[in-house]
Image (spheres, rainbow, N blue to C red):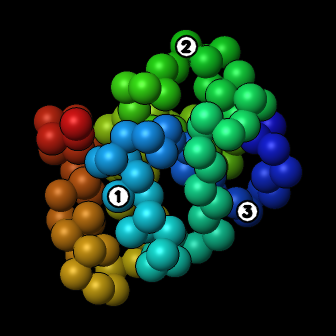
Amino acid sequence: MLDDQSNDDIVLVYDKQGPDCDNYGQRLGSKQSVGPLRIVDARQSGDVLAEITAQGLDIDQGMVVKMDGLLCYGADAIHALALISSRGGIFNRLNDWIFRSLAISRLVYP
């Protein structure tokens, strides 16, 4: 379990030292476009990082989204966020347009 996550929370975990992930996470979080989104810096919580690495995921190589008990990683994570995000605002529309397709997400995800 990621910290005190409720079943309704969507948790975005990434290394805030990575500028691309941090910029994306801050934009997504500041817009409140995903609902009950909780952003976690992987470097600030050993429990979060332990769960992610126990699944064989490398937080240095991609962000993680946890929702409904599932971990989505990298392109799958950004795709999941695009599917549940609102379509209001330029950032959200662009996010939806680029990452709604899983194939495109996997192609363009850094």
User: Which tag is nearer the camera, tag 3 or tag 1?
Assistant: 1
Q: Nearer the viewer, residue 24 or 74?
A: 24
Q: Residue furthest front?
A: 17
Q: Earlier in the sequence, mark 3 or mark 2?
A: 3
| x and y, in percent, of residue 109 in the image | 23, 40
Residue 44 screen position, x and y as percent? 68, 40
The numbered disc on residue 56 is: 2
Residue type beneath disc 3:
Asp
Marks 3 & 1, CB-CB < 8 Å contact: no
Q: Is residue 53 above or below residue 109?
A: above
Residue under label 3: 8
> Does 39 sit above or below residue 18?
below
Q: CA distance from mark 3 to mark 2?
A: 25 Å
Q: State the residue at coordinates (37%, 25%).
A: 61
* Mark 1, residue position: 23
Which is more N-terminal, label 1 or label 3? Answer: 3
- In the picture, the quarter occupied by the N terminus is top right
